[in-house]
C-alpha cells in the first residue's frame, strides 16, 4: 500500500515548484527597478503555504529591506476583505436586503430630491459596480472635515454615466455599515491579522504624497479614505500571512458563511460577482486559472486571487507606487505573469 506521506511530500514538492516559477517575475521586476519590492504568498487547501519576499520596503528617504511579515496598505482589497463580507453577513441575518435601495439605511441620501436616481441604487448594485456613479472623484479636495465630507457625498448630485468600477459604491456601503453599527469604520474590528494603520518601521512605504507632504508609512495612501478618516473602499492594512489566512478561511468555509461565499462567487456581470472580479479576458488573475476563481487588486500594488475549484489562493503584495505613482511599474503584466505561473498545470 502506498505511503500517504509520499503523496503528501509529492504534493508539497509540486507547490514548491509552482511557487518558484511564480516568484521569478516578481524577482525580475525588483532587479530591473520596476518596483521597490514585494511579497508573494501561495496557500493550498491541503498542502500548506509558502511566502517569500524580494527587494525593499522603502527607498526614500531611507532604505529598508522587505520582509515576509512586512505590513502593506491593502488599498481596494479592503472592499473584499472587510466591506463585502460584512454587507453579505447583514443580508444573511435580514438586517438589510441586497435588492433594497441604500436609502433603507441611508434615508438622507439625496434627501432634497425624492426622485433622484441615487435614491434607487441598491446594495447589490454597489457590490457589483452596476451603478451610474463616476469612476473617480477627488472628494478629498472639497475639505478636511470628515463629517462634512460624508454629508457632501450623500447630498452631491452625481453625474450619471455607464456602470464602471467606482469607489463611490463602496464608500456608500461603508456609510451603511457605520449607520447600522453606530461606529466609524476605524472604530470597527478589522478582523484577525488586519488593522487600519501600521507601525512605520514595519510597513511598506507608499507614495511621497503631494498634499500631505511626506512619504506615507503606516497611514492610508488613498486620498479620499484619508480625508474621510476611514471608509469602506480602502484603508485596511495587513501582511501576506493575514491575507492568506483570510483566503484560506474562504476555501475552508470558515471566514464567512457558505451562503456569503456562494454570493462572492455568483456572477453579477461578465466581469464581476458580489464584491469580487471573476475571470474574463485580460484580467489580472491570468488565463490559466479555473472558472471558479475570484480576485481583486489594490491601487498600491496589492492583489488576491482564490481558485475554489483547485483549492488554491495567492497574494502578490507590492509597493509599486513608492515613491511615486507616476511611473510605469509594469504591475499589470507582473500580476498576470505571476498568476499564470501559479495556475499553470
Image (cartoon, helix red, strand yellow):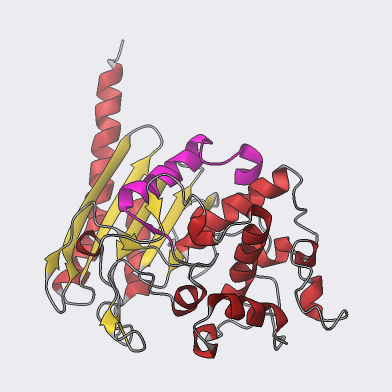
338 on left or right of 184: left
From the top left corner, tell me how far across and down residue 345 is, in percent. 37, 47
Q: Tell me which segment is drawn in magenta.
A: 236-262
Q: Measuring 80% from the left and 79% from the top, which residue is drawn there?
A: 117
160 on left or right of 137: right
95 shown above or below 228: above
- Name the outermost residue toward the right: 115
From the top left corner, tell me how far across and down residue 160 is, in percent. 72, 86
- Name the outermost residue toward the top: 1
Q: Measuring 87% from the left and 79% from the top, which residue is drawn there?
A: 114
In the foreground, 239 or 128:
239
Helix, strand or loop for the magenta stretch, by majority: helix
> Does residue 72 show up?
yes
92 on left or right of 80: right
> Does residue 345 show up?
no
From the top left corner, tell me how far across and down residue 82 is, in percent. 52, 55
Q: Quadrant of residue 286?
A: bottom left
Quarter of the N terminus within the rendering: top left
Q: Is residue 9 magenta?
A: no
Q: Is residue 255 magenta?
A: yes
Amino acid at each position: 500500500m502506498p505511503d500517504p506521506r509520499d503523496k503528501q511530500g509529492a504534493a508539497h514538492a509540486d507547490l514548491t515548484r509552482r511557487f518558484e516559477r511564480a516568484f521569478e517575475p516578481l524577482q525580475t521586476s525588483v532587479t530591473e527597478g520596476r518596483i521597490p519590492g514585494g511579497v508573494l504568498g501561495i496557500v493550498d487547501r491541503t498542502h500548506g503555504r509558502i511566502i517569500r519576499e524580494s527587494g525593499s520596503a522603502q527607498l526614500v528617504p531611507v532604505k529598508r529591506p522587505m520582509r515576509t511579515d512586512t505590513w502593506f496598505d491593502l488599498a481596494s482589497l479592503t472592499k473584499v476583505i472587510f466591506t463585502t463580507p460584512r454587507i453579505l453577513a447583514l443580508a444573511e441575518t435580514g438586517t438589510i436586503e441586497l435588492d433594497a435601495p441604500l436609502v433603507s439605511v441611508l434615508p438622507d441620501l439625496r434627501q432634497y430630491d425624492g426622485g433622484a436616481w441615487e435614491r434607487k441604487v441598491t446594495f447589490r448594485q454597489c457590490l457589483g459596480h452596476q451603478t451610474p456613479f463616476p469612476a473617480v472623484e477627488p472628494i478629498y479636495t472639497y475639505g478636511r472635515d470628515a463629517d462634512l465630507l460624508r454629508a457632501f457625498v450623500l447630498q452631491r448630485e452625481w453625474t450619471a454615466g455607464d456602470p464602471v468600477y467606482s469607489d463611490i459604491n463602496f464608500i456608500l456601503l461603508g456609510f451603511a455599515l457605520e449607520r447600522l453599527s453606530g461606529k466609524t469604520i476605524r472604530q470597527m474590528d478589522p478582523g484577525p491579522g488586519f488593522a487600519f494603520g501600521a507601525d512605520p518601521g514595519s510597513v511598506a512605504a507608499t507614495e511621497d504624497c503631494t498634499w500631505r507632504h511626506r512619504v506615507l508609512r503606516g497611514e492610508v495612501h488613498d486620498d479620499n479614505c484619508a480625508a474621510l478618516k476611514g471608509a469602506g473602499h480602502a484603508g485596511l492594512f495587513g501582511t501576506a500571512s493575514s491575507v492568506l489566512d483570510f483566503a484560506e478561511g474562504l476555501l475552508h468555509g470558515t471566514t464567512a458563511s457558505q451562503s456569503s461565499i456562494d454570493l462572492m462567487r455568483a456572477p453579477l456581470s461578465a466581469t464581476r460577482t458580489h464584491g469580487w472580479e471573476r475571470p474574463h479576458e485580460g484580467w489580472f488573475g491570468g488565463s490559466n486559472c479555473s472558472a471558479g476563481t475570484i480576485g481583486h487588486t489594490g491601487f498600491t500594488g496589492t492583489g488576491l486571487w482564490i481558485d475554489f475549484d483547485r483549492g488554491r489562493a495567492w497574494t502578490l503584495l507590492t509597493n509599486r507606487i513608492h515613491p511615486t505613482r507616476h511611473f510605469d511599474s509594469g504591475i499589470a503584466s507582473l500580476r498576470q505573469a505571476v498568476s499564470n505561473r501559479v495556475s499553470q498545470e
